[in-house]
Image: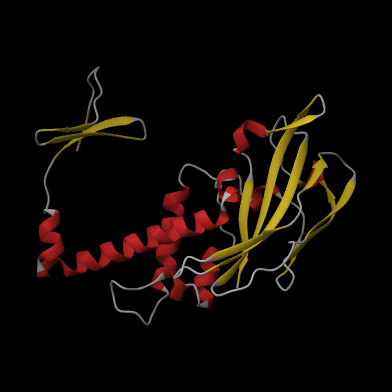
Amino acid sequence: MARVNGLIKIEGTVEDLTFYKKEGVSYVRRKGGVSKERINSDSNFVRTRENNNEFGHSGTSGKILRRALGSMALKAKDSKLSSRLLAVMSQIKNMDTVSARGERKVSIGLSTPEGKQALRGFNFNAKSTLSGVLMAPYTLDTTTGTITIPNLLTAEQILFPQGATHVSFQSSVLMLDFETENSEMFYSPSINLPLNMTASSVLLSPSQMPTGSGQQFFMLMISFYQQVNGVQYSLKNEEYNVLCILDVI
């Protein structure tokens, strides 16, 4: 692998050279390696095929979770969310101790205590995490899905970005079956508060609890806004928003 220092930066393949860009730097490498046909058929690559199958399954599982969360995942994410979810799903897949190598599943791994623990506290926006934003105690009732933040001083117990004037809280409970991809999610009403020193108790309860098979995910979202002439606008394209998995059962 070599860097490309010329004035003209290209991407793609020219004869046996592949040009590509990584983190803003242009590189070139020679094409080579084992053909896809050989990997798919040669007995010497059975381990490779098993690893590829589980890698693809872990990636798909991350997509299933993001899709089930819908707009919540879209409003609070970072540029490396897909790769971070892939890493966590791969860990959870490894918790499947009953399936054959190459066929281990996230759904089985997630049924274990260790698998659930791997997703607890997962932040969809690594640049804005729950522990780095909310400096107040909260409780979660997994029976009702209710999240309580008592006597919150928003200006003192919320680490808010410059320019923000208001903060909003919303919770949700998701029931997701990774095998069937069936999902059901219910939200709490959003609570919007000014960033000041007036104590406010935040009570977030979903409209109802989801049913069905799979695992329950308890989510908390924190969003920031700037009020101008009585209208609130999302702050800097929602890049400061928080979305965290509080618990999985």
Q: How many marks?
A: 0
Looking at the rendered image, the quarter that the N terminus falls into is: top left
Q: As drawn, which residue projects farthest toward the right?
A: 198
178 lies left or right of 149: left
User: Where residue 172 sits: x, y (%)?
Assistant: 67, 59
Looking at the rendered image, the quarter that the C terminus falls into is: bottom right
129 lies left or right of 7: right
User: Where residue 33 sits: x, y (%)?
Assistant: 12, 50
Closer-to-camera residue (81/70)? 70
**What residue is at 76 percent from the left and 49 percent from the top?**
190
User: Where residue 37 sits: x, y (%)?
Assistant: 11, 57
Vertical order, 75 against 179 (above or below): above
User: Where residue 181 sits: x, y (%)?
Assistant: 47, 65
Q: Quadrant of residue 4?
A: top left
202 lies left or right of 143: right
154 lies left or right of 184: right
Q: How is the image coloured?
A: secondary structure
Vertical order, 44 against 241 (above or below): below
Q: As drawn, which residue projects farthest toward the top?
A: 7
Q: Quadrant of residue 44?
A: bottom left
Q: Quadrant of residue 93?
A: bottom left
**What residue is at 76 percent from the left and 53 percent from the top?**
189
